[in-house]
Amino acid sequence: MSDTSPYQQSSAPSGDYPGKTLGIVGLVLAIILPLIGLIISIVASSQSKKAGYSNGIAKAGIIVGAILVALGIIVSIIYGVALGAALSNVNG
């Protein structure tokens, strides 16, 4: 008779490494909510680096998040300048 039960969990590695799932979440959030996705991707990349793994998905999340945050800042500045110019024309 074998000591293994059909309900016993195996201890085989699943192929996951620290930060993998968080990297995927960070990339998705970087597209939807860039600042939050950027922060989560940085955390995922840090976790993977500490464990000795390369996390390309987290790096992609960092890149996408940084670009979209920068674009958001630029668009906000342009919108603010345009709104200020429009309001100054109305009042003056």
Image (spheres, rainbow, N blue to C red):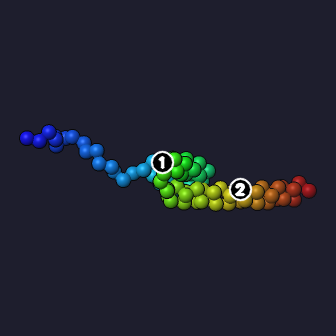
Circle nearer the N terminus (1, 2): 1
Look at 79% across and 60% down and name the residue there. 82
Which residue is denoted by mark 2 in the rendering?
73
Position of the N terminus by quadrant: top left
Can I make out residue 25 in this image? no
Residue 81, by quadrant, is bottom right
Position of the C terminus by quadrant: bottom right
* Residue in front for this viewpoint, 49 or 75: 49
Q: How many numbered circles does the render carry?
A: 2
Which residue is denoted by mark 1 in the rendering?
51
- Which numbered circle lies on residue 27? none
* Residue in front for this viewpoint, 80 or 38: 38
Q: Residues within 10 Å of mark 1 (few under 14, many from 20)?
A: few
Q: Give how far across and how far down residue 76 sits, in percent.
A: 72, 56
Q: From this viewpoint, which residue is outermost toward the right?
A: 92
CB contact under 8 Å: marks 1 and 2: no
The amino acid sitting under disc 2 is Ile
Q: Give how far across and how far down residue 63 sits, in percent.
A: 59, 59
Q: Give how far across and how far down residue 85 sits, in percent.
A: 84, 59
Of helix, strand and loop, which one carries label 1?
helix
Look at 45% across and 48% down and name the residue there. 18
The amino acid sitting under disc 1 is Ala
* Separation of marks 1 and 2 at Cα, in angstroms: 34 Å
Of helix, strand and loop, which one carries label 2?
helix
**12 lies left or right of 66:** left
